[in-house]
Amino acid sequence: MAKQDYYETLGINKSASAAEIKKAYRKMAIKYHPDKNPDDATAEAKFKEAAEAYEILSDDNKKARYDQYGHAAFDGPQGGGGFGGGGMNMEDIFSQFGDIFGGGFGGGFGGGFGGGGQRQARVKGSNMRIRVKLTLEEIAKGVEKKVKVRRKVQADGVSYKTCSTCNGSGQQMRVTNTILGRMQTATTCGTCQGAGETISSKPNGSDAQGLIVKEETVSINIPAGVTEGVQLKVGGKGNEAPGKNSISGDLLVLIEEIQHDTLKREGTNIHYDLYINLSEAVLGDTKEIETVTGKVKIKIEAGTQSGKILRLKGKGLPSIERYGTGDFLIHINVWTPQELTKEQRQFFDKMKDDENFAPSPKKSDKSFFEKVKDMFS
């Protein structure tokens, strides 16, 4: 039987980016995940097909070979690198692609999916959410933040026993009679909620699940180039769940950007308005500018016009996707004095008709709209 096209399996086209391929696979994997489709052979097959497609399309070399030769690129003893006709089992898939699920399911398989055996679900604690505010300087370099969180943890002295309802499997088997015969289905145990354990004793001060609230300092490594609204995850630093085999939830960190007093961010570029006086514009000068990575000196050429943009390559913010670093754009504004002394007014009166003061833009001088176009290109 001919295999389905890998792109069709994931519901994407050939021009899909790496992020789109990963997103499509995660959507399919969650839809057909064995935790959501217990004892469903069709879902298991779909789950494996999606994993096989992702294994090829997420690797640039394998993807290139597949785009050129199709499935034939991996047929036979010299194919190499494919799934070997769907030979990977569930343990292999979760070992290789476990990070795709972000801890949303129970992790590995205890009793072998599709093999008729029961498996004990691993109960996961709830996630916690916090906000972290960053300056542009911190965003430019990346930073380690230490924050205090109050999370639920298992109390010292709490003990558990095997759930008598499900005998530790975390599931209850139900048999129903249908016109097609006796049907057996597995559901999460209502007594232990899938943990396979119940509390036998707990210390004073803990809640009904044997948990207490504890303050803890968590270190968060924030990469350079993050943007407002980005959410980072610190695995295992959320609330714990009851049970010896349970796993902790995650700490979700929402990034907020503190507005800078003088600098404006546009993606990875930084904009700065520099005001100079008429004398500096006419005669030229040297200025020291504070960027997000330190101070730099710039030269103002004699005869500089208001609206001129100086571009400092690579002095902006790094891309979080590692596509390079933006630029630092300095917008020159010539400040016109609004009050003059008698001597100053006499001087400018004399200069009104002076040919050196007459506007004479060159063809090389760009208009305002051309400058805006260049700035965004």
Image (cartoon, rainbow, N blue to C red):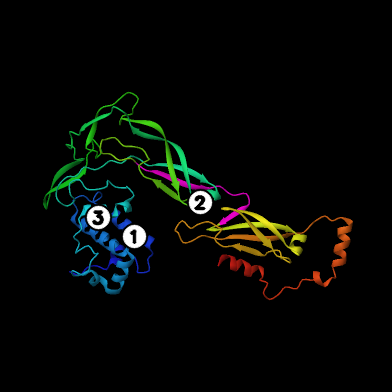
Label 3: state its secondary structure: helix
**Residue topped by disc 1:** 24
Q: Amino acid at mark 2?
A: Lys
Q: Distance from label 1 to label 2 (Cα)?
A: 32 Å
Who comes first in sequence, dot 3 or dot 1? 1
Question: For the point 32% across and 23% down, which residue is it?
Answer: 204
Residue 261 part of the magenta-drawn span: yes
Few, some or many residues within 10 Å of mark 3 (<14, 14–19, 20+): some
Q: Which residues are magenta?
A: 249-265
**Tags 1 and 2 touching, CB below 8 Å:** no
Q: Amino acid at mark 1?
A: Ala
Q: Distance from label 2 to label 3 (Cα)?
A: 36 Å
Please state if 303 lies on the left or on the right of 230 as rendered: right
**Residue topped by disc 2:** 141
Residue 215 position within the rendered picture, expressed as x and y whole percent measured from the top left: 42, 33
**Residue topped by disc 3:** 93
Name the image quarter holding residue 76: bottom left
**Can residue 11 be seen at all in this image of the molecule?**
no
**Tags 3 and 1 touching, CB below 8 Å:** no
The quarter of the image holding the C terminus is: bottom right
Name the image quarter holding residue 174: top left
